[in-house]
Amino acid sequence: MAAWIAMGGDLLGSCVYGPDVLGRAAGGLRFVLLISTAATVGTLVLLAVAYMRMIAQFPHGGGGYTAAKHTVGERLALVSGVALVFDAALNVSVSVVTCVRAISDVVPATWHLPRMAIAVGLILALAVVNLRGVKASVAVLAPIVLLFVVSHLCILGAAAVHRFHELPAAVVAIPTEMRQSVAEHGTGGTLWKLLLAYALGGSIYTGMESVSNGLPVLREPKVRSARRTMLLLVGVPGVIIAAILVDYLVYDVRPAGTKTLNAVLFERFASDLGVSSKPFRFVLVTLPLLAEAVLLVQAAQTGFVDGPRILGALSTDRFVPRRFARLNGRLAPAPGILLIAAAAIGTALVARGGIEPLVVAFVIAVFTTFSISQWAMLRHAVRRRRSADPGWRVDAAVHGTALVLCGVILVGTIATHWKPSVVMLALIATATLVSLRIRRRYRAMTTAIEQMSEQLAPTAPRPEPAAATGAPLAVVVIFSQRSEFPQLALKWLERMPFQFSEIVLAGVSLVDAEAVEGEERLRQLESERRRALESVAEHARRRGWRITVELRRGADIIETAVELVMQVIHRRGTQAMVVGFRAGADASAIDPLLRDDDAVRLQTRLQQEKVPMTVVSIPLDA
């Protein structure tokens, strides 16, 4: 239950804008609404089954990105990851824009709310809250989710019961409507209307990846907990969505000005009951709309959680700058939060607050990653055939069917709304190419370091550790996790014309996304870092160096480094030379995105402490 409350905001939020978009696409045709409703609910169930089977095969989390990386290669996985980042940003913009629309339906029409200004303000407010590290707890979320679920189930159920007698007549009239549509628009035109409604209903499936992505935070046994969470995650929204669409059918809900279709439905139900008193209208109309608005704020919040998490995974694989894996002083992924906020504001402004183009872009992003995920799982199931796994046929059937439906929704959305679709696909392609370029530059950096290390040929082994009287202490500050940097530092120091009394490898790490996965994970990271540096130090000791290792991890990497350097110098009580490394002159237009210049910033900061520091540049023109 707690996991469902924490992860269900996104999919529950789609109960607000998904049926609205689908109902508008139906164009008042009841047969389109009924058939697309049945197809949408069936697809929702099928995708839930597909993702539960994915969780069983990849129980360590990561969702479609992990499945694609291990099955169909890193490039397709990258496309999936990039689409998920856009998915998170569009989730924020769609949820906030719809939230403002829900608020507008509650306040008097004479108020003329500045919708875009309010939407941008909400996005900025959410960004600030997340930058401060204030995460919504289950205790805060539970009343919001329960208010939405209870109010909608009660009101929608009562509305359906009140006009249940009209449902048979609506169903019976469907064949006549279909014949009329075929006579007027032809068979192709009728199928086109069905495809349009079904494709735009793709916004309903958002949030399906949240359980597979969030597996590490679930309690043991994780697979069983994930299955239960997925059942609630899909079951409750599925019932609400079906109830909303059935009520659209029996109440013949159609667009009315700028109001959402849900607002039209609630007002029509209240009028149908003859309710005129303010308390009753508040319960039947205002309360559910306010519950939708508050829930949509929470749905937008999930974008600020999922987006930086995906960026962190891409950063670990060197597809985006390493800074996206870092946390600020309040342990929040600040760079990722700022990027998601900027993308959400940008998409909302480009769409001018229009919900349909935002939903179209949203569907393209969501079903790009869904399609890749299902293709990856289909390949994975077929490969298991060779190991005589009896479950491979079922998995192949489930993921194959899901892949076909994802393809239909993706192609249908592109065909019916090609302008926003092409823009979204172009953005995904551009971001993918930039990510591949970043990966190549990181590899160029590794090559440059290795080549520079080879050029610095070591001198003959020293017969004994250097301990000359008055010899300075060398403090080598290592920001990078790679072992090439300390090796390069030692070879560089060997070429110095004087000796050192001691060399200290000072490893400085910034608290990042991996470090807050738990105390055990933090100890594991520190142990791995120490082993790597000790291995380099032991090799140097055999060559006659007197060398030690010091580690420090903190929220501010520069202040943490200054604290460690000053502590080492004070403890030794001798003159010291501090050495750091940075990337050389830009050999590519993308290099400024990759370089943090921590060594240069540290040099400036140490000057204030009257401590000299040498920064060694590593050329990246390899």
Image (cartoon, rainbow, N blue to C red):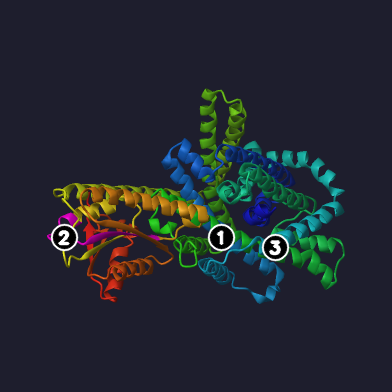
Q: Earlier in the sequence, mark 3 or mark 1?
A: 1
**Placement of 546 over or under 608, stated as above or below:** above
Q: Nearer the viewer, mark 1 or mark 2?
A: 2
On whether residue 497 falls in the magenta region, the answer is yes
Magenta residues, start to end: 493-509
Q: Nearer the viewer, mark 3 or mark 2?
A: 2
Element on which disc 3 rests: helix
Residues at marks 1 and 2, CA–CA distance in whole angstroms: 58 Å
Asked if residue 413 lies in the magenta stretch, the reply is no
The type of residue carrying mark 3 is: Ile
Residue marked by disc 3: 144
Give the Cα separation between the discs numbered 3 and 1.
Answer: 18 Å
Mark 1 and mark 2 lie on one chain; the one further toward the N terminus is 1
Q: Residue at x 51, y 28 (%)?
A: 383
Chain-order first, disc 3 or disc 2? 3
Q: Which amino acid does the dot numbered 2 rest on?
A: Gln
- Left/right placement of residue 496 relative to residue 584 reads left
Total labels: the figure holds 3
* Left or right relative to 246: residue 594: left
Front of the two marks 3 and 1:
3
In the image, residue 274 above or below residue 233: below
Disc number at residue 499? 2
The amino acid on which the numbered mark 1 sits, given as a three-letter code, is Val
Q: Position of residue 104 (x, y in %)?
A: 67, 69
